[in-house]
């Protein structure tokens, strides 16, 4: 490591203490300009009295437009926290119970599998302990993970196919027993919330979560006005790739957002914020299930990860070609959000030790004892 690199890491370790945005900027500059691991990044640092955004690099390979607080990134599985907040909001209103069987809130043409007399509950889905697989089986899927196949198969998979598969699904474990990360969980959860709320999932999320916080750039469907600000995804050779489309699993990973919006969101979910979603945000951490593969606990939407320097709350979002990560310390009331418009292909090894995308940067800034390069596995 060069002296400059060592100095940058040392300054990053003091970022909260000395308010040193240059330390964060050095990390981003090295990753983009020196290591060539991504094209553009942004980091948000949020405390009760301040929101700071540091950016470096470009939105796209073909032009020089810099990443800014208004750049629209794919935030992928951070969407799950938003979906869990909708669940918490509906629970606080008495519309659902966290431990209700999901079948109670689904249309009559859904038939949900059980095992050992145990039904899948809403909390099981939100904590990835339902026993359902990571994805449903897609027709003609290869034996090993193939990103090109997934990019075609996921958006083409229909609700009718899902409903036909679900009753015959053999659960991997009895509901509530074992943690296994999955997008299927949040797809089914959103279908139940939509039916119980009497409106499409996206409309419920808009009125219950996004609008109350003024998150005008957080959306499943970017407007024409947002088009010029969309971050382009890139492969590990920094070549452009198509955007992610997760079809009926939008609640598991379909949102796009900006550093400015997620800074506001991070401020709203910090304990004691007094925001309009504060009570729902607090409720998310009250249900916790063991999650050994990530060395921690799974809450509703959030993961609670053990780490040098103390446990912290985390959620990563990895789309096909972009990455985002939000971490926070509820005791110190500090949060960090990181974005990258490139993610290495190696991140498709599940729980792969952190990956070098956005997660390791966010974790390192919040917990300087965690080295860049990642300690805790990334889920997506």
Image (spheres, rainbow, N blue to C red):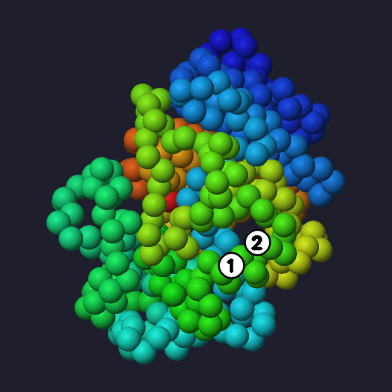
User: At which x and y percent is residue 7?
Assistant: 66, 16
Query: Which residue appears at 31% of the width and 61% of the height?
Result: 135
User: At which x and y percent is residue 88?
Assistant: 61, 73
* Disc 2 and disc 1 in contact, CB within 8 angstroms: yes
Residue 49 lies left or right of residue 256; in this view the side is right
User: At which x and y percent is residue 223?
Assistant: 56, 50
Asked whether the viewer can see residue 370, the reply is: no
Query: Which residue appears at 28% of the width and 62% of the height?
Result: 157
Q: Between residues 332 and 80, which one lies in front from this camera angle?
A: 80
Q: Which tag, 2 or 1, sits closer to the chain's start?
A: 1
Give the alpha-carbon distance from disc 2 to disc 1, as whole Å. 6 Å
Q: How many marks?
A: 2
Residue 242 lies left or right of residue 257; in this view the side is left
Q: Is residue 211 above or below residue 376?
A: below
Residue 173 lies left or right of residue 106; in this view the side is left
Q: Between residues 128 and 241, which one lies in front from this camera angle?
A: 241
Q: Is residue 195 above or below residue 208?
A: below
Q: Residues within 10 Å of mark 2 (few under 14, many from 20)?
A: many
Query: Which residue appears at 61% of the width and 78% of the height?
Result: 90
Kindly identify which residue carries mark 1. 205
Kindly identify which residue carries mark 2. 210
Residue furthest toward the front?
Answer: 224
Q: Is residue 180 above or below residue 329?
A: below
Q: What secondary structure is marked by label 1? A: helix
User: At which x and y percent is residue 102?
Assistant: 44, 82
State which quadrant residue 43 falls in.
top right
């Amino acid at each position: 490591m060069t002296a400059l690199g060592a100095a940058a890491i040392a300054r990053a370790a003091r970022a909260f203490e000395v308010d040193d945005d240059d330390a964060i900027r050095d990390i981003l500059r090295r990753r983009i300009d020196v290591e060539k691991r991504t094209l553009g990044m942004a980091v948000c640092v949020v405390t009760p009295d301040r929101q700071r955004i540091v950016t470096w690099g470009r939105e796209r390979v073909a032009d020089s437009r810099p990443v800014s607080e208004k750049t629209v990134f794919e935030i992928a599985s951070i969407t799950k926290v938003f979906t869990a907040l909708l669940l918490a909001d509906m629970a606080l209103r008495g519309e659902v119970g966290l431990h209700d069987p999901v079948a109670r809130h689904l249309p009559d043409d859904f038939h949900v599998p059980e095992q050992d007399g145990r039904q899948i509950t809403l909390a099981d889905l939100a904590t990835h302990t339902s026993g359902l697989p990571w994805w449903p089986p897609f027709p003609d899927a290869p034996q090993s993970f193939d990103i090109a196949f997934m990019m075609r198969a996921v958006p083409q998979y229909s609700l009718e196919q899902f409903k036909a598969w679900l009753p015959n699904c053999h659960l991997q474990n009895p509901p509530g027993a074992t943690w296994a990360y999955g997008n299927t969980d949040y797809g089914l959860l959103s279908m139940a919330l939509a039916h119980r709320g009497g409106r499409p999932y996206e409309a419920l999320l808009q009125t219950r979560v996004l609008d109350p916080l003024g998150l005008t750039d957080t959306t499943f469907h970017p407007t024409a006005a947002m088009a010029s600000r969309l971050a382009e995804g890139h492969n590990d050779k920094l070549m452009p790739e198509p955007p992610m489309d997760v079809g009926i699993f939008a609640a598991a990973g379909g949102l796009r957002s900006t550093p400015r919006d997620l800074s506001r969101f991070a401020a709203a979910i910090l304990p004691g914020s007094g925001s309009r979603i504060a009570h729902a945000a607090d409720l998310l951490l009250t249900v916790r299930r063991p999650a050994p593969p990530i060395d921690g606990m799974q809450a509703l939407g959030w993961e609670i990860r053990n780490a040098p320097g103390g446990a912290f709350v985390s959620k990563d979002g990895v789309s096909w070609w972009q990455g985002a990560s939000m971490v926070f310390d509820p005791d110190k009331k500090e949060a960090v959000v990181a974005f990258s418009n490139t993610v290495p292909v190696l991140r498709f090894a599940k729980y792969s030790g952190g990956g070098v995308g956005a997660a390791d940067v966010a974790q390192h800034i919040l917990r300087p004892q965690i080295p860049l390069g990642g300690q805790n596995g990334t889920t997506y």
